[in-house]
Image (cartoon, rainbow, N blue to C red):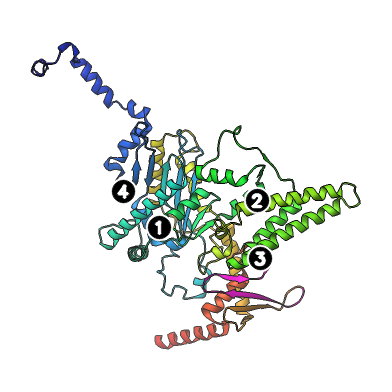
């Protein structure tokens, strides 16, 4: 040290002592430094070999440089799930509650799997027997796809998140085709499905059949910004919840909604927010709004939706005016209450025009915005991503809040790894699965009774019910190449999901009439017996 000071011409009194140097090095190496700065811990981990194959994109937080924290995570296994099963769609949602002490939002992108039932490659003849057909379409399990921890979930961050995952999927697909990637913890059928999906990504693009989101403008615009032609569906539960609990801004609700969508979260400062008033309507009108809204969702094309919207508003206005006249008939206040009813109707009308009946949101909740050939089965709610958050909060974060950001990253790594090492082969029979099976069995009975007929118009079929309680009734079922089935029964109008009549028609289309199907089965069995002899 003395020789170094002498050669460099440094004042010895300005040099630290050996003890001071040892103390500085010891403090720099101390783990307390990492414990005090969670972002520094994430930065060290993200740039180490330990995070290789998990960190897709990373931008460190720097107050000095003005950069914002952005960390995208996915595993090769989760990327393979999105490569191999794009027909199962992608579910997207964000959450702040009890995720980290910095209050950074966590965004999850998940898909679904039904192991043992959805390994068939599209284009192959999968439905060989009646049992195979009855077991098709059963919802599967949630499978993690990717995660994002960012400063906010505005439109730009969502777009960047999807673009990062899209790039990672293309790189992974190229590695799979070149034989450089290892498909671990997969069956042979699953490997074949993933390789087929990798070729499809390489030749065309990664295009999930649909995206499922909540009623959030940032998510919708972010998806459209990354993949312009994507089919986006809005969660039916959140639609009903929003309509049931909405409040109308007394100034301009549209400006507030757009601002909330861009910000990606609600403002905490209630003093600055515009005061809102509740629209006072009877429970009967509320119920009618939900019933009529679900009916107008059944539109099979955009042209019919304009007529359905006018019918929707007419029914609500008629109900409100009729109820007001009935309640205040003969009263001196009838005219004033009628004015209030008309004003309330105008508020309701303006809300639906601003929030739902616009070019941005109409395709997300009406049936004409569904993927080609699909009904609403499996495309109504965002349950898969809600399940992911519930599992992450309960099993990996122990339902406790104020986790550090670095601890959240490690918990996400364990969360992804768990679904890779411990797959669940069998789906639990939920209420939706039981409903679907019930409709399948009832539809099979209609088909076996031979009461499904071709209406002769090419796309139209008739299911004749001779045992209807009132009179024999015919149910019209329509099939179009660009959309799913349509039925005029009350069950289909209410939910837009597979009903017994649509399933009977599906059987008729796939297998022919029951008599023809039985003859083919008899011939196959007879030929098999002769071959054995």
Q: Are marks 4 and 1 in contact (CB under 8 Å)?
A: no
Labelled disc at residue 82: 1
Residue linked to disc 3: 307
Task: Report the mark closest to the observer, 2 or 4.
Answer: 2
SS at mark 2? helix
SS at mark 3? helix
Between the C-alphas of marks 1 and 2, the distance is 37 Å
First in sequence: mark 4 or mark 1? 4
Residue linked to disc 4: 53
Name the residue furthest top: 13
Residue linked to disc 2: 351
Q: Position of residue 271 (x, y in %)?
A: 61, 32
Snapshot quadrant of residue 475: bottom right
Snapshot quadrant of residue 71: top left
Between the C-alphas of marks 4 and 1, the distance is 16 Å
Q: Position of residue 215 (x, y in %)?
A: 56, 50
Q: Is residue 320 above or below residue 436?
A: above
Q: Residues within 10 Å of mark 4 (few under 14, many from 20)?
A: few
Segment tinted magenta in the rendering:
470-490
Between the C-alphas of marks 3 and 1, the distance is 38 Å
Q: Is residue 301 above or below residue 287?
A: below
Front residue of 503 and 307: 307
Q: Is residue 533 visible?
A: no
């Amino acid at each position: 040290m003395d020789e170094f000071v002498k050669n460099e011409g440094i004042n010895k009194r300005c040099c630290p002592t050996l003890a001071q140097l040892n103390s500085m090095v010891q403090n720099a190496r101390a783990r307390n430094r990492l414990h005090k700065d969670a972002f520094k811990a994430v930065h060290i981990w993200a740039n180490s070999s330990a995070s290789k194959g998990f960190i897709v994109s990373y931008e460190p937080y720097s107050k000095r440089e003005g950069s914002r924290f952005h960390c995208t995570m996915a595993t090769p296994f989760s990327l393979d799930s999105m490569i191999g099963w794009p027909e199962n769609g992608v579910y997207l949602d964000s959450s702040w509650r009890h995720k980290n002490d910095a209050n950074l939002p966590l965004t999850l992108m998940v898909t679904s799997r039904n192991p043992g039932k959805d390994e068939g490659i599209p284009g192959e003849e999968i439905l060989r027997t009646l049992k195979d057909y009855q077991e098709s379409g059963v919802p599967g399990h949630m499978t993690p796809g990717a995660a994002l921890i960012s400063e906010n979930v505005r439109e730009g961050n969502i777009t960047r998140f999807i673009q990062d995952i899209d790039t990672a999927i293309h790189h992974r697909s190229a590695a799979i085709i070149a034989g450089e990637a290892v498909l671990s913890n997969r069956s042979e059928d699953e490997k074949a499905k993933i390789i087929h999906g990798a070729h499809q990504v390489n030749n065309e693009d990664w295009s999930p059949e649909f995206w499922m989101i909540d009623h959030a403008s940032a998510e919708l615009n972010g998806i459209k910004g990354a993949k312009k032609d994507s089919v986006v569906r809005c969660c039916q539960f959140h639609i009903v919840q929003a309509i049931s609990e909405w409040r109308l801004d007394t100034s301009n609700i549209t400006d507030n909604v757009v601002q909330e969508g861009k910000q990606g979260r609600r403002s905490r400062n209630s003093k600055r927010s515009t005061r809102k008033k509740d629209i006072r309507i009877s429970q009967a009108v509320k119920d009618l709004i939900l019933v009529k809204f679900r009916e107008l969702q059944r539109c099979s094309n955009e042209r019919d939706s304009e007529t359905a919207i006018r019918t929707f508003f007419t029914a609500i206005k008629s109900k409100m005016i009729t109820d007001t006249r009935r309640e205040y008939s003969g009263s001196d206040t009838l005219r004033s209450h009628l004015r209030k009813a008309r004003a309330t109707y105008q508020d309701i009308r303006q809300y639906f025009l601003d929030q739902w009946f616009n070019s941005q949101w109409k395709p997300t909740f009406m049936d004409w915005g569904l993927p080609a050939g699909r009904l609403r089965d499996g495309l109504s709610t965002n349950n898969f991503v809600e399940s992911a958050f519930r599992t992450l909060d309960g099993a990996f974060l122990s339902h406790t809040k104020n986790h550090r950001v670095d601890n959240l990253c490690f918990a996400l790594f364990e969360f992804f790894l768990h679904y890779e090492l411990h797959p669940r082969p069998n789906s639990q029979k939920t209420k939706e699965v039981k409903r679907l099976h019930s409709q399948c069995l009832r539809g099979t009975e209609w088909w076996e009774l031979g009461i499904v007929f071709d209406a002769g118009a090419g796309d139209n079929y008739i299911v004749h019910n001779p045992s209807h309680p009132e009179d024999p009734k015919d149910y019209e079922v329509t099939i179009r190449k660009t959309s799913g089935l349509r039925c005029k029964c009350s069950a289909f109008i209410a939910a837009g999901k597979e009903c017994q009549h649509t399933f009977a028609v599906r059987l008729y289309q796939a297998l022919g009439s029951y008599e023809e199907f039985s003859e083919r089965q008899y011939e196959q069995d007879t030929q098999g017996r002769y071959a054995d002899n």
